[in-house]
Amino acid sequence: MSVSTLATEALAVFAKEVRSELRSRVAINAIGLFGLTTLVAVAYQIGPYQIHEQDRPHLLAALLWIIVFFAALSGLQRVFVKEEDAHTAKTLRLAARPLAVWGGKLLFNVVLLAALEALLVPLYSVLMGMHVVGVAPLVVLLAAGCLAMASTATIVAAIIARASGSGTLFAILAVPLMLPLLVMLIAGTRMAMTSPRWGDLLPALQGVGALAGVTVVASVYLFPVIWHD
Amino acid sequence: MATVRITFSELGKRFGSRIVLRGLSGELRPHCVVAVTGPNGSGKSTLLNLLAGVMRPSSGTVAYLRGDRPVPRHRWHGLLGVAAPDMAVYEELTALENLRFFARLRGLAHTDGELARLLGQLGLASRDVRRPVATFSSGMKQRVKLAQAVVHEPAVLLLDEPSSNLDEEGHATIAALVARFRGRAALAIATNDPREMAWGDERIHLGN
């Protein structure tokens, strides 16, 4: 298998996803509106002044990732569901290698989730008064969390794409898989709010990185089986 | 380069308790167009799906052979061109963007001019190639579907009701396409149209 050809195919799939999404904006609107709406509601009701100082790291970290997680759930499944709904899945199956399809769509979900985090995290910091001491470690945690969440969402989306009631099924399958990831992301974010040291975030970073690695490797073996009948 | 042929032996497919195909054997090869005919629900599309590898048979085997050497399954997609009613192209993209995408997937570096020429050969006017496919009629969408099936000059071409939604001019375009690929590709056409059946050198009739 030529790695460069696989990469070229995956990039072609990614470019198509970006072009399609910029025209239709379905996932962008779903994720963006859900995230912003939830953020505004939380900021309005709770805000930076309703939380005791000693509780701030715990609550702010948890609320941030709840907002990001549910916003992601509202849109990341579309990469495969829309192919089945539009009857383009068979056309794509016949034209591209499975790993190229998976790679292109994973890259798209990573970019989408990264854009969501880039929008929400600074806004959240301002609206909720979240002060981060370890900025660099938090950025790395966000990137690792983005990859882990996107890779889990992508493979689950591929699994449920052909099922009826795929929206509900996606949540049912994705939530238990992402729960350990969420716990580690919340713990790492809490640590970044109180400590600038990389060492204090290392357990969370290692856990999130390991989950991302396991999901990606499992997807490489699982996706070709899922993709073909 | 040696031509590609498809052999299938004792092919069968069941969906639950319903047996659609049973004990089917044959070969697709260049210079011999195979027309697959039969009443609705007889398994014409199912047979093409099995030959394309998008569906696994319940029994029997499908093999792609280049000369006498089997082609590994993960390489079939590069040899294959398929157009079928249950396939669609991306409606939010233009005809040209669709064809560029499918060409890139197959490692082709065709220019937009070359792709537009192919679309023109299949009856799409030059003023339409840069319009979103969502604005096309069903006949125009069919032409884009056919274009993506042949852009890479496939060694195997499977057409399921290729003239559906096409006018007389479209039917003539398909006839020219079949004539062009007759000598160079293993070609099968699933159809109930007598005019399309007439293109077949051999016939597989399903449903009895």
Image: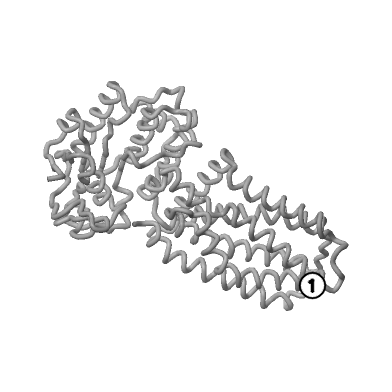
| Residue B136, picture quadrant | top left
- Give B111 or B20, whichever is nearer the viewer: B20
Residue B63 in sight in this render: no
Q: Which residue lies most toward the front here?
A: B17
In x, y percent, where is residue A216?
51, 66
On screen, residue A54 versus residue A137, left or right, reads right
Q: Which residue is drawn at 64% across and 60% down?
A: A69
The location of residue A124, given as percent across then percent down, is: 77, 57
In the rendered view, would you say B190 is above or below B16?
A: above
Q: Mark 1 points at which residue?
A: A196
What residue appears at the point 72 percent right and 51 percent down from the top-left corner?
A36
- Hey, which quadrant is residue B22 in on the image? bottom left
Q: Which element is circle 1 on?
A: loop
Q: Where is residue B153 in the image (x, y as percent from the top left)?
A: 30, 40
State whether residue B166 is above or below residue A132.
above
Q: Is residue B156 left or right of residue B197?
A: right
Label 1 crowd (10 A; few <14 / some 14-19 / many >=20): some
**Can see residue A142?**
yes
Q: In which quarter of the image is the C terminus of chain A?
A: bottom left
Vertical placement of A8 versus B83: above or below? below
| Left or right of residue B203, residue B138 in this image | right
> In the rendered structure, which amino acid carries the disc numbered 1?
Pro
Question: How many marks are shown on the rendered structure?
Answer: 1
